[in-house]
Amino acid sequence: MGHSPSTEARSAPRPVVLNCVLTLKCNMQCPYCVARDMRAYARESDGNLSISDSLLARINASPFTAVVITGGEPLLPECESRLLRLVHGLQDKTITVDTNGTIEPSQRIRDSLREYDVLVRVSLDSLRIEDEQHLRRTAGAFSATLEAYKLKLRLIPFLHDNGVRVSVQSVLHGFNRQSIFDLPAQLQQWSLEDWYVQRLIPATAIRHDPTAFLSNDEYDHLFTDLAALSARYGIRCITKRDRRHNCVFLLIEDGELYTQGEPTQWKVHLGHLGDELDYFAHVSALDHCARYHDLRIFPPHPAYKPL
């Protein structure tokens, strides 16, 4: 369903953030991962993004001001060469790498993250492994998830202490609505500045689990309380409060551009990056703006007006 440009163009005249899905492969099996739904649209099982000179030129010529390298897990060792080529080939774009935090990047990657001032966002929903286990877990025994969780808690301060810009990204849901309030004090101990918190998006594997989701009012109240608590610890809490799911742009494989789509699992194919695309034909410009307007990863555009 399209959105009227007359009512939305003034708030978001151009798209801001491009999510480059480097791979759909991951070392974890989190049931709320919307990237798993993307596999139905990929020609290859791993959905690897091909980083060609042509694709880099198209990304650099696009109106996006920020690139988020995501997956799957972009820090898998087999993705290293493509990750580095993408980071090194981007021009005049701010760069973020989203990771589950269970894989220590190589020295080559850490050097590039520092050189190109890349922000690494590590997914962490709780300091209680029982809460984390609900929706962030590895395959197999609980002990495997526990070891991955311990590695994550070591990796965050390790990256920060080695000069990499790092922040934590959390998903607020029914299982961590209490324990998530313990995170700001820990982020302060790690000397982090930013904390990204978003609401749970219904992925196929959990869309029928009523215990995982909160009401809109509950989300609004919890976001407000989390931001106030974070401020007392000197942490900037950046909340993603968008209620529709089709406000993101997803670039996969050889440059095909998708958006999340409204219903669970459904994706909208927008075309090939570099074509004359109507970016906001299916993507809500207002929600795209609301999701990204206050992120520090890119300079705010004067035409953007937050909801």
Image: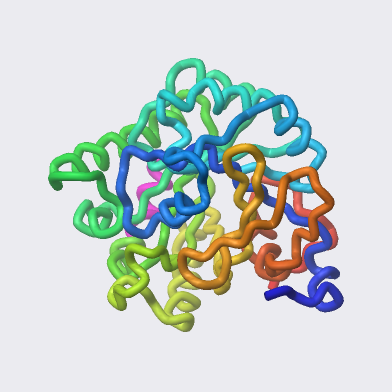
Magenta segment, which residues? 181-190
Question: Is residue 243 positioned above or below 197 on the image?
Answer: below
Q: Quadrant of residue 293?
A: bottom right
Choose between 250 and 99: the one closer to the eye.
Answer: 250
Choose between 297 and 210: the one closer to the eye.
Answer: 210
Q: Quadrant of residue 5?
A: bottom right
Judged left or right of residue 167, residue 95 is right
Position of residue 21 measured from the top left corner of the image (x, y, whole percent)? 54, 42
- Name which residue lies at 41% across and 30% down: 76
- As for residue 74 lying within the magenta part, the answer is no
Residue 166 shows in the view: no
- Name which residue lies at 37% across and 50% down: 124
Position of residue 227 measured from the top left corner of the image (x, y, whole percent)? 50, 65
Quadrant of the snapshot with the C terminus: bottom right
Question: Is residue 225 positioned above or below 156 on the image?
Answer: below
Quadrant of the snapshot with the N terminus: bottom right
Judged left or right of residue 264, residue 248 is right
- As for residue 187 lying within the magenta part, the answer is yes
